[in-house]
Amino acid sequence: MVCEYGPKRLRFRQSRYTTSSSASADKTRRESNALREPTATSNDPGAISATSETPHAAPSDHLDYRSHHPNSIDGSGSARILTRTTPLCVSAEPLHRRANADITYVSPGNNISSPNLSPPHTLTDEVDCKVFAFYVESAGHWIDIGSPEGYFHSYVPQLALREPLLLAACLSCASHLMYLRGLIDKEAEQYYSDRVVSLMIPALSSDQANSSNEVLLATIVILRMSEQFLELSSDAQRHLQGAASVFLDGTDWSPVETNLATSCFWSYLRESIRISFLREQPCPFDLGHLTLREDDMTIPAATDGIWTHRMTFLIIRAGELCWASPRQYAVTEARRLKTLLEKWRAHLPPSFRPWCICENDNNPFPNIRYFAPWHVMLAVYYPEDWADTNLYDMHRYIETAIVAPTRLLCGLCMSNMANVGTNLNGSHLMAWCGRFLSGREEQQCLLNFLTEFSRNTKWPSQVDCARLEETWAKSRRPWLDCLGVSPGV
């Protein structure tokens, strides 16, 4: 049986990025505010056995869920192994119909309350409870690192107790991460993986497989989080490449709109940035239809999340300039991007300012602390007109424009070791930019950090570390050697 994301179905809508509070603007609110009825198959929590033998597709554009998990763990954890002996225990009562019933925005900090929703299920199995707790207390926070609203660790768990597909995704992701840490056995992890596949197949086959289905969008983001814990060579990106047909159906995603579906989209884009840096390739998704592309950074941003979304989009555009095929107007685009980056930085709200910047006696990188959890502001690519730049000033330029921000980025991530989400989003940026570090102490400190972070969290870092060591082994200043510039000039 093949579980496959469908082709794109373009459904253009009016932009919410430029809407006002008028009545006509209200008509453009996302359809994600309308609750829909799940399919009969996905509404039956007990329909799938824990020993499912359903085969899954292997091609890269299919969802081969069995390939998401490694065959072994390092066995370093000493925690008790949890073994599943009973099936997932949740009520199988049908949910109320999700037709045309608009609800207002629900803050993640509040309980979900609506007459159109059935009472939440209550988990009664010990393993289910422990696995779900890991999602609520850990994995959900890691996904939320770019979202001040905290949808994935507060709102999504509440919604999951009413939505079997979303609950299965939370349990599948959490069980995989627990398995990597030696906290749960392979049989239990495989049970949760098989279960979410069995519920995902009918969801993707229905007419609700589009960007208005916030449950499906959240499921994709959560499963992609789990998939990212594979090394690059094993990561088929099934929940990244394939999911484009669901997210990019013509919806004009906005950085200023606040709801679960929008949060899912920006989380999805942040998940794509890591692959772009690891493979040094542009974002594979066509975002040309977004009104955000015309954003001149003059529209006031009411929340930190909006500023984070804007920088996410700017980093994607920087990747296009770096790694896409040469274009006729690349220089003009580069200059415009630099202007936008400068405007973004100049108008940052106070919450984006660090409250601590000080030197570390035992670390070559500074200690930097922020009130908000994910404010990695490194502009990884500052375009310049090289025709006007003296090559003999290149060393000074690189130190100022690349190495100095890299040191700040490394200091920021290393100063927040306890915040796993920060480093899930920052490690690939550190590794890519870290190739420009020339000091032996800095190089070793970065390698030690990436290795330790991987050991503690099972986050893949083999490719990052290997590339750093290969680059540094060629020369202490490989970029100057390539240019034929003497570092002493």
Image (cartoon, grey):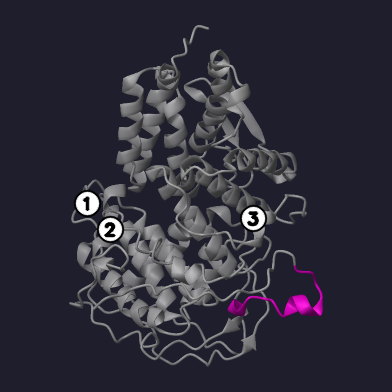
Query: Does residue 22 lie above or below 489 as drawn?
Result: below
* Residue 73, label in figure: 1
Secondary structure type for disc 1: loop
The quadrant where residue 122 appears:
bottom left
Q: Is residue 23 magenta?
A: yes
Contact? badges 3 and 2 (CB < 8 Å) = no
Identify the residue at image location x=74%, y=56%: 302
Secondary structure type for disc 3: helix
Position of 270 with respect to 440 (left or right) is right
Select label 1 or label 3 by which is in front. 3
Mark 1 or mark 3: whose residue is earlier in sequence:
1
Q: Is residue 91 magenta?
A: no
Please name the amino acid that badge 3 sits on.
Answer: Arg
Please name the amino acid that badge 1 sits on.
Answer: Ile
The quadrant where residue 61 appears:
bottom left
Q: Position of residue 54 (x, y in %)?
A: 21, 77
Q: Does the image show residue 130?
A: no
Q: Which residue is mark 2?
A: 179
Please name the amino acid that badge 2 sits on.
Answer: Tyr
Gap in Å between the C-alphas at discs 1 and 3?
43 Å
Q: Which residue is mark 3?
A: 293
Q: Which residues are magenta?
A: 19-32
Identify the residue at image location x=31%, y=70%: 127
Q: Position of residue 175 (x, y in %)?
A: 32, 63
Crowding at mark 2 (Cα within 10 Å: few <14, some 14-19, many 20+): many
Crowding at mark 3 (Cα within 10 Å: few <14, some 14-19, many 20+): few
* Residue 411, label in figure: none
Position of 1 with respect to 31 (left or right) is left
Select label 3 or label 2 by which is in front. 3
